[in-house]
Image: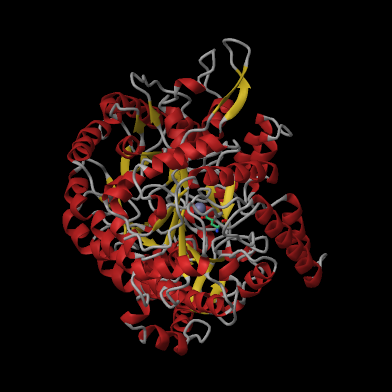
């Protein structure tokens, strides 16, 4: 039996973010479409050559995208909302970028300048990659656009690369699409007809196989979706190329029999997220269906344990032909570890980026086809790395483990119940009714970014940088006092990023210089790498808080990032459960909370911006996740006295199905995003009788528009329809770092004025409210 290697997709952004820079040059008008396409074609050619040289047998084409592969699919199907359609009906690159990013232009009809907003963007399953949500307008007709997948296949073939083109499957595309009261699945037959034509074109161009991605198969499916699968593949299987139905991000579970019964020629399953599905998959998948096993983690940066993998796969490979692949596209990991110069040797030994992962697959293939001796060196290196990960003192810290083991339930309980805390805090803080505050950051101006860059380059020494940051902080405190805010913040000027800032001060984290991963379009992030036990060698934020508080009599909030958010925005070690790592972070941040309190801080905000997005794809996994996530938050926060007010902040608005867990966090004040939903979500808080105080954001900081007093008063009046006045705070819906001071100043002034208007006739909450 033979084993071959596939890559399901390669990072598009380029080893040195070449795509990002090419896109930005094009958008700023410095380079035309031809230059952009030349740069993109160069990246594609390099990626094919690289993957083939590394030993991949199945090369993907059309895994590349200038912005987003979901948007590419929408364009191919002609799902272009009317507001983007040019007068001449053409849908070229400018239409594409308008859908991706919005545009300002001149309407063809009346010569007046108009702007179109971008399509909605949201997270691709449970990754940090964002796609443009397909929009299906009522009465929408579809029609084939440019067949980018056929172009990509031909482009590769012309260069001598035989590829397996990648298509996003019709059921996943429809499942991600958003109607406006209408049901996208009404278009199923129309969509299938177009897919059938695309597949026929691919066959005609010479494609023997097509990789058709249906990650929706690892989620809870409705009956409608299941029926759509059966109907779709009965039709598409007859359209030409053999189909490799590709699933990832989880196990097929109850959808396994559905998938295995589809008339496709191959099936790819994720054995990293769901290793336990191997046995049931082997039993369910017919012998004549080519099985592709996702054995190398496409979502994380750890080097694989080749010996352990071979132990599992050898018996399977004796019985049937196999394709070995990453669990999913390599889009979600950085390109090449060899480019990384800053990581120390130990950590480097434990890692594998996209290039290294393909080499691992090639080594597995060699060992399976020709015996382990044929891959002896790769196996020996992998063994050595695995052994050192088991024992390295850089990873394993006895003290941290003992501390986690010694956590008691009492450590997760505040001393007093909410009623007592509200009364105590009201006395200590003496805030007015409808207290005003902000979420933490103030504008990261070009000057702030410049100073940080100069400091990093060594052109500005530590003392000079510190002086600069203190001056920014002082100015911001003064301005907040003048503006009349009740609870102040220091402004977060010293922070590059809300997770990285803490990761850099904790042990157990490493940072890359070039480990970029695409977040959306040209935007990339460098997630911290959480490789070991986490400890906090020294206080992280106390001096900044102390300095800020020394400047004013008003309370200044301590500002921390919560453990769940730090975890969810990092590459997390895979040698222990995620929740074990989260508990370690929780203890480290708990130390910081207690140090802030000891320094005199009376209100501490612990941001959990990413708590909700950590929810598992399957409902069945939700409660277990929420339980440990809430536990970790409580472990972080609960050590303080009744008088210390714990705030938390979450910048999203979908709380309905997780409200009990939000309440169980037991924060004294929560600030949330509501400005865009007109306070609708507060009804849910009211129905649930949410007990603590809430700051429903009244200023949508994602928009450059400056709201006025009247509209914020109106929003707060809507809030009062649901919540008691003494429960309400007045604040923006997220940090202000992305805004400019000339936007922030009038908006906050109006917000303070709104709070003063609201206070008329209302007394401050000195009495318990519950
Ligand atoms: N405190 C952070 C800030 O204001 C919170 C950011 C966030 O929620 N994403 O920037
Ligand atoms: Zn936020």
Snapshot quadrant of residue 172? top left
Quick check: can you spot residue 163?
A: no
Snapshot quadrant of residue 237? top left
Quadrant for the C terminus, please.
bottom left
Residue displayed at 20% across by 42% down: 222
Quadrant for the N terminus, please.
bottom left
Q: Residue furthest top?
A: 110
Residue displayed at 80% across by 72% down: 463
Image-quarter location of ligand 1: bottom right
Left or right, residue 764 beside residue 185? right
Quick check: can you spot residue 665?
A: yes
Number of numbered tags placed on the structure image: 0
The spot of residue 234 in percent (x, y) is 21, 34
The spot of residue 701 in percent (x, y) is 56, 44
The spot of residue 728 in percent (x, y) is 43, 52
Q: Is residue 108 above or below residue 254?
A: above
Q: Toward the viewer: 746 or 631?
A: 746
Residue displayed at 32% across by 50% down: 685
Q: Toward the viewer: 550 or 204?
A: 550
Q: Is residue 525 above or below residue 135?
A: below
The spot of residue 677 in percent (x, y) is 41, 39
Q: Which colour style is shown? A: secondary structure
């Amino acid at each position: 039996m033979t084993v071959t290697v596939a890559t399901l997709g390669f990072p598009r952004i380029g080893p040195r973010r070449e795509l990002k820079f090419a896109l930005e040059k094009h958008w700023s008008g410095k380079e035309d479409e031809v230059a952009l396409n030349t740069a993109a074609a160069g990246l594609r050619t390099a990626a094919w050559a690289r993957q083939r040289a590394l030993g991949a047998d199945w090369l993907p084409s059309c895994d590349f995208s200038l912005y987003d592969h979901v948007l590419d699919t929408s364009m191919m199907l002609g799902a272009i909302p009317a507001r983007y359609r040019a007068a001449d009906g053409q849908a070229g690159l400018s239409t594409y970028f308008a859908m991706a990013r919005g545009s300002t232009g001149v309407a063809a009809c009346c010569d007046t300048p108009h702007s179109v907003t971008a399509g909605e963007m949201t997270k691709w399953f449970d990754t940090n990659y964002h796609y443009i949500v397909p929009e299906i307008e009522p009465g929408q007709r579809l029609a084939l656009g440019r067949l980018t997948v056929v172009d990509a296949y031909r482009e590769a073939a012309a260069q001598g690369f035989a590829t397996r083109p990648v298509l996003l499957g019709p059921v996943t595309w429809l499942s991600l699409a958003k109607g406006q009261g209408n049901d996208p699945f009404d278009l199923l037959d129309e969509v299938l007809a177009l897919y059938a034509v695309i597949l026929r074109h691919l066959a005609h161009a010479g494609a023997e196989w097509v990789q058709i991605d249906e990650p929706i198969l690892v989620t809870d499916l409705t009956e409608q979706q299941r029926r759509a699968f059966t109907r779709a593949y009965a039709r598409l299987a007859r359209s030409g190329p053999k189909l490799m139905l590709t699933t990832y991000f989880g196990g097929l579970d109850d959808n396994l029999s559905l998938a295995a019964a589809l008339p496709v020629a191959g099936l790819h399953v994720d054995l990293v997220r769901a290793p336990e599905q191997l046995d049931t998959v082997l039993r369910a998948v017919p012998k004549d269906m080519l099985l592709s096993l996702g054995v190398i983690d496409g979502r994380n940066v750890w080097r694989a344990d080749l010996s352990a993998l071979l132990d599992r796969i050898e018996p399977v490979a004796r019985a049937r032909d196999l394709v070995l692949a990453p669990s999913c596209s390599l889009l979600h990991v950085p390109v090449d570890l060899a480019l990384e110069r800053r990581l120390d040797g130990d950590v480097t030994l434990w890692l594998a980026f996209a290039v290294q992962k393909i080499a691992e697959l090639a080594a597995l293939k060699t060992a399976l086809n020709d015996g382990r001796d044929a891959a002896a060196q790769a196996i020996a290196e992998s063994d050595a790395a695995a052994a050192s990960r088991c024992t390295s003192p850089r990873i394993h810290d006895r003290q941290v483990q003992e501390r986690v083991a010694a956590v008691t339930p009492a450590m997760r309980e505040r001393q007093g119940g909410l009623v007592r805390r509200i009364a105590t805090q009201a006395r200590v803080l003496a805030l007015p009714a409808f207290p005003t505050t902000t979420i933490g950051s103030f504008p990261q101006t070009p000057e702030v970014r410049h100073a940080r860059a100069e400091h990093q380059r060594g052109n500005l020494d530590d003392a000079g940088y510190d002086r600069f940051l203190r001056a920014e902080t002082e100015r911001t405190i003064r301005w907040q006092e003048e503006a009349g805010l009740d609870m102040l913040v220091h402004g977060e000027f010293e922070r590059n990023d809300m997770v990285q800032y803490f990761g850099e001060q904790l042990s157990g984290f490493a940072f890359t210089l070039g480990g970029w991963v695409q977040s959306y379009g040209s935007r990339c992030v460098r997630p911290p790498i959480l490789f070991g036990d986490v400890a906090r060698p020294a206080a992280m934020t106390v001096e900044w808080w102390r300095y800020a508080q020394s400047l004013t009599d008003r309370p200044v909030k301590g500002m921390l990032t919560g453990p769940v958010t730090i975890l969810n925005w990092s590459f997390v070690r895979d040698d222990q459960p995620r929740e074990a790592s989260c508990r370690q972070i929780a203890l480290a941040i708990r130390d910081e909370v207690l140090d802030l309190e000891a320094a005199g801080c009376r209100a501490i905000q612990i941001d959990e911006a990413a708590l909700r997005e950590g929810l598992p794809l399957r409902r069945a996994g939700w409660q277990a996740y929420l339980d440990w996530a809430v536990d970790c938050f409580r472990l972080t926060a609960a050590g303080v006295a009744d008088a210390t007010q714990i705030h938390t902040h979450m910048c999203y608005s979908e709380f309905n199905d997780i409200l009990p867990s939000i309440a169980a966090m037991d924060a004294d004040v929560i600030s949330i995003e509501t400005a865009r939903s007109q306070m609708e979500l507060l009804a849910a808080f009211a129905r649930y009788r949410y007990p603590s105080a809430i700051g429903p954001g009244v200023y949508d900081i994602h928009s450059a528009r400056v709201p006025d007093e009247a509209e914020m008063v109106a929003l707060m009046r809507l809030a009062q329809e649901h919540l008691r006045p003494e429960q309400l705070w007045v604040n923006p819906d997220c940090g202000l770092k992305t805004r400019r001071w000339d936007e922030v100043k009038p908006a906050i002034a109006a917000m303070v004025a709104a709070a003063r208007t609201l206070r008329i006739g209302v007394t401050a909450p000195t009495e318990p409210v519950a």
